Amino acid sequence: MEVINRKAKFDYFVEEEIEAGIELTGTEIKSIRAGNCNLKDCYGIVKNGEVFLLNMYIGQYKEGNLFNHSETRSRKLLLHKKEIKKLAQAIEVNGLTLVPLKGYFKDNKFKILLGVCRGKKNFDKRETIKERDIQREVKKNLKNY
């Protein structure tokens, strides 16, 4: 099961990628395995020397009843102190944003690929669309030969 944030690469320039663990409850893991997860409109912040992921949607688990979680609660990311300091410096000094690019299972643990990103302007987005169209045309022409 892999969850991809498709809007991230369209809205941001990714300067660096960091893999982080995420602190979840039991019903959240079961819900992610069932495919009820979304990284859209999600971002990370550094607060009191810890990194948190805000607005990540994980749907409620059907059989969870009393022990179910709230769907968009803030979740703590698990990183080394050195990495957290590096991220905090990038956010404060350079004005960058923490955006989750992908969520996936690795050795039976759910990981988040976190991108240190700079926002794109509208003309940059148009350029991205133009490049994508050119690549599509090249692939189409190669298949015809």
Image (spheres, rainbow, N blue to C red):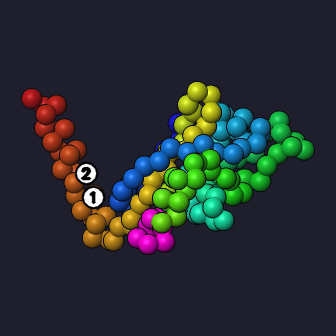
| Visible residue check, residue 6 | no
User: Measured from the top left, where is residue 105 in percent x and y?
Assistant: 57, 33
Question: Disc 1 on helix, strand or loop?
Answer: helix
In this figure, which residue is indicated by the disc labeled 2?
Answer: 132
User: Measured from the top left, where is residue 70 in percent x and y?
Assistant: 77, 53
Check disc 2 and give the amino acid type: Arg
Residue at image location 22% in from the left, 54% down from the top: 131
**Label 2 packing within 10 angstroms: few (<14), some (14-19), many (20+):** few
Give the position of the C terminus as an image quadrant: top left
User: Measured from the top left, where is residue 77 in percent x and y?
Assistant: 62, 50
Depth check, front residue: 78 or 97: 78
Residue 89: numbered disc:
none
Q: Quadrant of residue 144?
A: top left
Residue at image location 55% in from the left, 45% down from the top: 20
| Visible residue check, residue 112 | yes
Which range of residues does the magenta coloring cover?
90-98
In this figure, which residue is indicated by the disc labeled 1?
Answer: 128
Check disc 1 and give the amino acid type: Thr
Residue at image location 90% in from the left, 44% down from the top: 66
State whether residue 99 is above or below residue 144. below
**Label 1 packing within 10 angstroms: few (<14), some (14-19), many (20+):** some
User: Measured from the top left, where is residue 9 in percent x and y?
Assistant: 38, 54
Q: Residue furthest right?
A: 66
Q: Residue furthest left?
A: 145
Q: Quadrant of residue 73?
A: bottom right
Is mark 1 in CB contact (under 8 Å) with mark 2? Answer: yes
Depth check, front residue: 78 or 83: 83
Q: Answer with left or right where residue 127 lies relative to residue 30.
A: left
Distance from disc 1 to disc 2, alpha carbons, whole Å, reads: 6 Å
